[in-house]
Amino acid sequence: MEVTPEATKAFQATKTIGIIGLGDMGYLYARRFSEAGWKVVACDREDVFEQTKETFKNDKFQIMKNGHFVSRISDYIIYSVEAENIHKIVSLYGPSTKLGAIVGGQTSCKEPEINAFESILPDDVDIITLHSLHGPKISTTGQPLVLINHRSTGNNFQFIQCLVSCLKSKVVFLSAKEHDKITADTQAVTHAAFLSMGLAWRCSDQYPWETPKWIGGIENAKINISLRIFSNKWHVYAGLAITNPSAHDQILQYSKSTTALFVLILEGKKKELRERLLKAKEFVFRHISDHDLLLDDDILQKFSLSKDPPGGRQPNSHLSLLAIVDSWYNLDIVPYDHIICSTPLFRIFLGVTEYLFCTPGLLDECIDVAINQDMFRHEDLEFSIAARNWSSIVSFGNFELYKQEFERNQRFFEHMLPEANAIGNEMIKVILERVSERES
């Protein structure tokens, strides 16, 4: 069905949008929809009702006391809550859903979300859910937005398409199963890598931007991405990792790849290490040549947290990045297959690994450093332990343990997170401009 200004205005005249949960993404949707002319009602926890009213008093949407008040008057209700709480919150407010309404959610794993809707809500409630594949501080324009038309009647799907058109996102239509597989393929391994970097730096009690050995464009990207992850809320990553079965397998494989590569390094098996990594390179990057590379050291050199003038690039084993590509190979994942559903951070992950593996001579340099030098051996040991630690937490399915570990690392880096976010935003902007140029 066609999305037109006329259709959008017709729906705006009769439809009310409800948002349950005013975290960062819930607020982004409430603000953007209301500014575009939609009637929006929203709520957060009832125990902070007065505080919520004060916080959002200058916004165009209306604050309600709780999800019952939102649900009973809304034609489309978006549950913007943590993945671990989706069943509990739907159980609480679902009985108040307006007759014939549509429900959806913003969780990063759709199977538990849809199971909650199907098991709790009556059959006359349509289920059209969505997922913006970016963080709340990134412009929605041009970013992937997944729409999942799980069940709908009449012109309800056209209504939702008209609603989200104000975000100016790149809409991708998937099933819940496709969504969960693709998000795991594009995010689970890379999140594990950069979470493990942060844990390893904390456990070795070092801030990499203060350490001379962490010099160069790739190091800047690794540091900025890791700190950007720790500047967000823990549940953003825990929801994907713990609730998505595909993510479990991939995070486990990342731990296995890290350990296997580190063992080859310790045993000095240069030939075996090189053969293994070249197989992974051929599988993942077979269509890339050096003139196609998204990134180069000159670009990444600009985005340093160091207070000292940038020096030359310091050779590194880059075990964390080698293990990402080794994991993709062992999982039979070609990340470029899912580029249409990639987050801004994933495109940077991919660009950095692409640069490392496809820049002439750089991969061989990493292998040589790993085998013949020991200056990064301690860090590689800490990293291997960190990767296994995150894998264990995810396999236990323990949200509280995940939260504790995440926030412990967050506190270690907190004094640099605002600056890292500002530099990271600029880095993302520059890199996404290059992505657009390459794709056009």
Image (tube, rainbow, N blue to C red):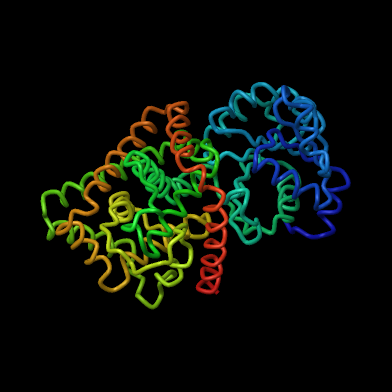
Location of the C terminus (image quadrant) = bottom right
Location of the N terminus (image quadrant) = bottom right
Using the rendered view, name the quadrant where residue 351 is placed: bottom left
Left or right of 60? Residue 260 is left
In the rendered view, would you say 248 is above or below 190? Answer: above
Left or right of 85? Residue 34 is right
Using the rendered view, name the quadrant where residue 404 is placed: top left
In the rendered view, would you say 155 is above or below 309? Answer: above
Q: How many marks?
A: 0
Measured from the top left, where is residue 69 in percent x and y?
Answer: 80, 27
The residue lying furthest to the bottom in this view is: 291
* Residue at left offset 37%, top offset 40%: 202
Measured from the top left, where is residue 19 in percent x and y?
Answer: 72, 37
* Residue at left offset 14%, top offset 59%: 372
Left or right of 27? Residue 393 is left
The residue lying furthest to the right in this view is: 13
In the rendered view, would you say 258 is above or below 169? Answer: above
Whether residue 48 is visible, yes or no, is yes
Measured from the top left, where is residue 186 in percent x and y?
Answer: 44, 51
Q: Nearer the viewer, residue 157 or 206?
A: 206
Whether residue 133 is visible, yes or no, is no
Left or right of 410? Residue 29 is right
Measured from the top left, where is residue 413 in percent x and y?
Answer: 47, 43
